[in-house]
Image (cartoon, rainbow, N blue to C red):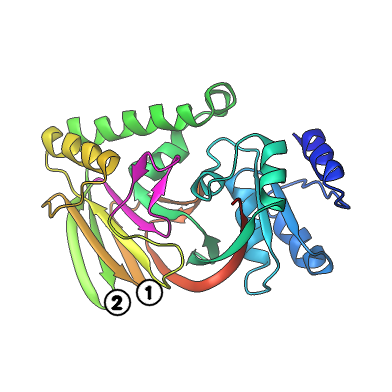
Amino acid sequence: MLAAARRAFAEAGVALDVAVTERPGHAAEIAHARGRDYDLVFSLGGDGTAMEVAGALAYTDIPIGVLPGGTGNLLARALGIPRNVERAVKGLLDGGSRQIDLGVVHGHRFAVAAGVGIDAAMVAETPRWMKRRLGVLAYTLIATRAALRSVVLKRFFIARVTVDGEVIERRVAAVLFANFGAILEDRIAFGPGIACDDGVLDCCIFAPRHLRDALRIMWRVTRRDFRPDPAMVYRRGTRFHIETVPELPLQADGELLGTSTADVTVEPLAARLLVPR
């Protein structure tokens, strides 16, 4: 993929310096130390690498190009970036840019969503070999297994979420703090009217009581049907606090970041990302 990216930049007449990451957190260090010396900064990797770069360059107005090189590539997919690296380079160089909000949880910035429950279980339980062989399908299979396990075995948890002062307590399967409204080329939508540039995050609480509720939720998020539903709760805000019983893992943009007792905030229009036409 790096060779393909080099070819695409060379064909476009763009001078390119490459820095290779060696460990988690290294992309942030490189972007913080060197990113301001360039007209554009591109990441080639998964969502974790992209968010390290975006977090390090937040509020600098330096355009960031996300090249898909990971398993889920949720941010690249949400922005409509082609999955082929050469096409992605050409599309981003010929496109424009947009400012987006970033969420913050446990001191880490995220772009797409942070969550507790089924999504975090998916991140924790998907084996590396399956991601290499199946790509994003691996996440889909493990998420489906986690959802069925939660509902059939009734492995729900108690979530107490405070949204700008309002307290919501439910027995739930998942809680999401969403910045983008949909993932996987809009195949799955989190909730109604979610925008990445409105200065707020959307808290999406999914509280099925039984299998019928769970199937209805799955149908509605794939069909963008967000009529009032007792198993789906939505709140928009800028400051959130979540506590769960029991304590569970929390993920943000596909990275496990800590436990489910957390404060979540939003940084309006913090990142400038390149987008295709």
Does residue 29 sit above or below 221 in this rendering?
below
Q: Nearer the viewer, residue 75 or 171?
A: 75
**Residue 124 shown left or right of residue 118 in the figure:** right
Residue pictured at 37% horizontal, 34% vertical? 143
Residue 17: where, in percent of width, then height? 87, 52
Report how far apart the C-alphas of labels 1 and 2 lie in the structure: 7 Å
Q: Nearer the viewer, residue 233 or 273?
A: 273
Range shown magenta: 173-191
Indicate which disc, 1 or 2, sits on the residue closer to the N terminus.
2
Q: Residues within 10 Å of mark 1 (few under 14, many from 20)?
A: some
Q: Nearer the viewer, residue 167 or 179?
A: 179
Do the residues under discs 1 and 2 have CB atoms within 8 angstroms?
Answer: yes
Amino acid carrying mark 1 in the image: Thr
Residue pictured at 51% horizontal, 58% vertical? 111
- Dot label at residue 238: 1
Does residue 172 sit above or below 32 in this rendering?
above
> Outermost residue, top direction?
133
